[in-house]
Image (cartoon, grey):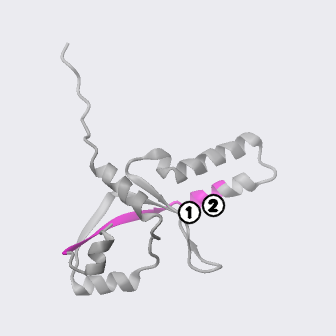
Amino acid sequence: MTPRCDLAREKNPTFQLVNLKSVKEEWLELHEIKSNETAGKKTKDSAEKSIRKLVNHGDRSPKLHFIPQIKLSADEVLGPFHAQFNFMNCMEANAEIRRSLTDQRVATLSNEFVPSLVERLGAYFSRIGTPDYSHPE
């Protein structure tokens, strides 16, 4: 989640990382149901609705952001994922960690997806959040 300009300049003192939760099993299962010739209309409609919920950031959860599948090769696909804003980590951005993260990188989010991810993260953190309370009668 570290801003791209900070990464390019290598002047940032920390990296902000967000946890990616794989929703691949559920995704594959729902698509299998949807394409099943013997499944009833109600079952297929339910699967379609569940797929939409996954794509719509976990049914519009403010703490999740949908990341599409990452195709590593013809046979290897990762994800899709939900980025979990409520599970972020901050780590020191020293040279060793910078090299390690670069070496371990599997994919980079393409430019067309970055603005919506950053916008959702900003919306998550800018929530005012008022606890439930009862008014005295």
The residue stretch that appears in magenta = 13-30
Q: Which residue is mark 1?
A: 24
Circles 2 and 1, Cβ within 8 Å, touching? The answer is yes
Give residue 131's mark: none
Indicate the quadrant containing the C terminus: top left, top right, bottom left or bottom right.
Answer: top left
Give residue 24's quadrant in the image: bottom right
Percent x, y for residue 131? 24, 35
The residue at 28%/66% (across/down) is 89
Q: Secondary structure at mark 1?
A: helix
Q: How many marks?
A: 2
Residue 61 in the image: above or below residue 104: above
Distance between the Cα atoms at labels 2 and 1?
6 Å
Residue at x 51%, y 50% (from the top left corner):
56
Q: Which residue is rendered at x = 26% and y = 40% of the image?
A: 129
Q: Relative to 53, does residue 105 appear above or below in the rendering?
A: below
| Residue 28, numbered label | 2
Q: Position of residue 132 (x, y in %)?
A: 26, 31
Is 134 included in the stretch rendered in magenta?
no
Which amino acid type is shown beneath numbered disc 2? Leu
> Type of residue at label 1?
Lys
Q: Position of residue 100 (x, y in %)?
A: 32, 85
Badge 1 crowding class, 10 Å Cα cut-off, few under 14, some 14 to 19, many 20 or more, is: some
How many residues crowd around disc 2 within 10 Å: few (fewer than 14), some, or many (20 or more)? some
Residue depicted at 20% across the width and 79% down the height: 11
